[in-house]
Amino acid sequence: MAAVNREFWAPRAWVGGRWREQVRLAAGADGCWAAIDCGVAPPPGAERLAGDALPALVDAHSHAFQRAFVGLSERRDDAHDDFWSWRDRMYGVALKLKPEQLRAIAAHLYAELLAGGYSQVCEFHYLHHDLDGSAYADPAAMSHALADAAQDAGIGLTLLPVLYERAGFQAEALRPDQRRFATTPRQVREIADALRGRPGVTVGAAVHSLRAARPASIAELAAACDGPLHVHVAEQTAEVDDCLAATGCRPIEWLARHAGLDARWQLVHATHATPAEIAAVAASGAGVVICPATEADLGDGLCDLPRWLDAGVPLAVGSDSQVVRAWPEELRWLEWGQRLLHRRRNVSAAPGVEPSSAAGLFERVRAGGGTAAGFTHWGLEVGARADLVELDPAEPALAGLPPSHRLDGLVFGAPAAPFKRTLVAGRWAAADRGALRARFEAVMRDLWPAV
């Protein structure tokens, strides 16, 4: 057994997929859980939690720089507004940011994510080059800015530098307003290697999308990647139509046939998937990352959640464009979207197995998020990193609920983030959120002086 570095005791904790009473949680010197015991009195010297303990979750898909665009795209001046018009406006932010500004934006965001119940963020990072598209003296400068921001806030980071080569299936190169994104498979590996070994940082890689990368480059990157490998796929119906026209396959179908899908792969969005595609993903062992709030905000559509669940595909959630920064609200909208679509309740529940929609979804995204971030273990279990969130015992929305229904109330009846504090690798996240916010506000004044 690993040496115990710090002990905690919770009146109730979510262990093994259910609430357990009087739980001792011992963190080792390596920042992982060394022991977890249920039904025990508080050990001498253990820190007693006032509220119940839940596993912190992984935010499995983030574009940190887009936090600077939240609230600034909610007006329509033309006859039509959709994902593609939003994307063009979002590029205006991407073309302005310098490394120190990205660090300030990301640090503020990461502090918000910690308050929202996350302790690890997967950064799908494609903002690599200088304002004019030329390489920085340090090609990993923007990636280091993100790692510095994660350290400032106290959150764990999985960095996923992105392969981005072309503007579309028929394009030879990127558009001028995509000039900061350009990478080759070799450059992606070099950026990952530059961050490898930084404390608190895990590295993997990403393919922006099938439209943005050549098949040979996807194959080269996949062959060299020894960590999680993420890709945007089937988010928009126009993307599906373009892929069919260019390749004769739907996007997920193409990945299943040609990309060698395995457990490293995480298909981000996968909104427009056929039953055959879902079955192929399930057979491959790949996971899916759903971003309910962003997909609603952008008008992407609703995924076939019942089939993903029935197929046993690993699932995770992500904050993506940052319109929501707390996992309870993401789970709420994941289920609520299905209720609106199917016109029935508790779509995610499994009667006879797990009757609680909240518990079923929470357990799926707890495990799936850990895999998406590159961890073998995740949650309140021995060997997993010593992370948790403490529920605020004074939260009025949870008052009077029987313990067995507390997670249901948290997801479907409480504010977005009724948490008191977040533990990361055995230490409470304790960044000065006021100072991080002040830095963020200064950057926002520089970015949007006219607004």
Image: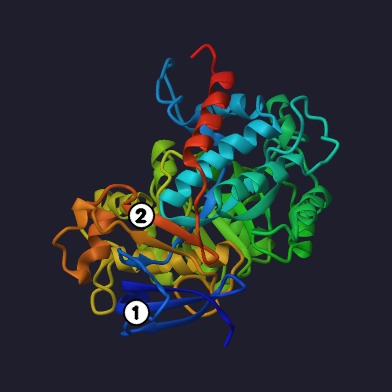
Whole-percent x, y for residue 49 in the image? 35, 66
Q: Residue visible at 50% across and 63% down?
A: 369
Whole-percent x, y for residue 157 in the image? 61, 54
> Mark 2 sits on what residue?
420
Whole-percent x, y for residue 175 in the image? 71, 28
Is 268 displayed left or right of 112 in the figure?
Answer: right
Q: Is residue 378 above or below residue 117?
A: below
Q: How is the image coloured?
A: rainbow
Q: Secondary structure at mark 1?
A: loop
Q: Residue visible at 34% across and 79% down?
A: 42
Is 74 displayed left or right of 165 in the figure?
Answer: left
Q: Is residue 290 visible?
A: yes
Is 159 displayed left or right of 421 in the figure?
Answer: right
Q: Is residue 288 above or below residue 209?
A: below
Q: Is residue 208 visible?
A: no
Q: Say few, some or many: other residues with alpha carbon within 10 Å of mark 1 (under 14 / 14 to 19 / 20 or more).
A: some
> Mark 1 sits on what residue?
42
Which residue sits furthest top? Answer: 450
